[in-house]
Structure formats: structure tokens, C-alpha cells
Amino acid sequence: MSALLRTSIAVAIFAACLALIAYAFIEAPEWAHKPEPAGVGIVAVSEPLAPLPLEATFTTAGRSEFEGLALSFKYPNFWEYGAPNPHAVDATVRIMRPGSNPIRATIVLLVTRSPTAFDAPKPIVPPGAKLLTARRRPLGTTEIILAEFVTATPLEDYQHVIMLESATSTRYVSLTATCHGPTGSKDVIDRQFEELRATFEAVLSSLKFEDR
């Protein structure tokens, strides 16, 4: 066999090897096309995570700004609690998930005697909000409204909200759980809301109140 022929065969074999290597990188092996087992990988938006432990309790007992309203609810004890903020007609409490994430999670209690709250159609949602659900149900002897809505504010803040509200002849009460952040992060905000949905629902379900 001539040297030229041997060289030609060696070049052909080398080219074939290169082709096999390139194919291995371009064409994924058969096992790579198999679907991922159920329950593995990224959590689906439609599958909320289990609720966080609710080991802290807020109560209005003994707080003059709530004027005799006995109300309590539970929340995650590592979330940051803000002292009640009393105004002429309002008393508010804000509890926030810790951290500097631009997408924030908060729980807000509002108790107001403002006539606007009594006269407004229920549920009370911001102008332009998209109401997803609204249903009435009893809580002891009180009727409450459970509502879920999404909205974008003029400050480019997108919110996904679930809320309980109740009104008597003298007082309007709402307990709101929300994820909110820049409007450009809408999909991420909705996803975080779904991941926290079970926690938010547990917080709202823990609400207990009665006028004395």
C-alpha cells in the first residue's frame, strides 16, 4: 500500500471521527428527549407551595386606636411587623416579608370609619382593577367578602391581591395580602403570589373578630 493511499485512509478515518463528535454535540441522545418525571423541576404556577408556619399573632386587644374592636389574625413570625398607624379615621397595620427584593409581599389590616368606605360598592378595589373573584360568606355573625384582583397603579406598581373585607354601620375592616412590584415584572409577581397563595389564604382564614 502506497504512502499516499495510507495517508488518504487516515484522513478519511479522522474526518469520520470528527463527524461523530460533532453529531454527539448537535443531536442530543435519546435519553435527553424523555419527559421529566412529574413533580421534578420548576414549581408550576398552578401548584401553590404549602403555607408557611403562622406562629405570630396580631391582636387589637388593648389598643385604643381600634376603639373596642376585638380582632386577631396569625402571620409568619419572621415577617417584619409595623406598629399600628392611627389617623383621624383610620388605623392600619403592615406586615412585610423581609428582604430587599423589589417584589414585595405584605399583609395589611385597615380599620376605618371613613364614610367613603361605607358608601363605596363592595368589594372596594382600586379604579381600573381587574376583579378575578368576589364571594360573600359568613364569619361568625358577620358577613365578609373574599375578593381577588390585580391592578397597576399610576406609579407603575403592579399588585396581585387577595382580600377579606367587612362593613358595619360604624366601621369598615379589610385584611389584605398582596405581592407587588414594578409593572414590568408582572409575570414574576403573579408567580410569587401563587407560591404564597396558601400562606395568604391561611392568614386570611385565621382572622377572628367581634365588636364589643
Image: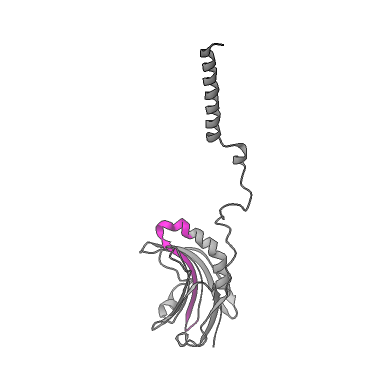
Across and down, in percent, residue 159 comes to 44, 64
- Residue 45 in view of the camera: yes
Number of numbered callouts drawn: 0
Magenta stretch bounds: 168-189
Above or below — where is 31 with respect to 8? below
Query: In the displayed image of the protein, which residue is found farthest to the right?
Result: 37
Question: What residue is rendered at 49% in x and 75% in y?
Answer: 174
**Relative to the observer, which residue lies in front, 30 or 103?**
30
- The part of the image, by quadrant, that contains residue 142 is bottom right
Quadrant in which the N terminus is drawn: top right
Across and down, in percent, residue 169 comes to 48, 83
- Residue 158 in view of the camera: no
Across and down, in percent, residue 38 comes to 63, 51
In the image, residue 180 lies in the stretch drawn in magenta: yes
Query: In the displayed image of the protein, which residue is found farthest to the top?
Result: 2
Above or below — where is 47 with respect to 121? above
Above or below — where is 35 with respect to 47? above
Across and down, in percent, residue 122 comes to 48, 72
In the image, residue 131 lies in the stretch drawn in magenta: no
Quadrant in which the C terminus is drawn: bottom right
Question: What residue is rendered at 57% in x and 37% in y?
Answer: 28
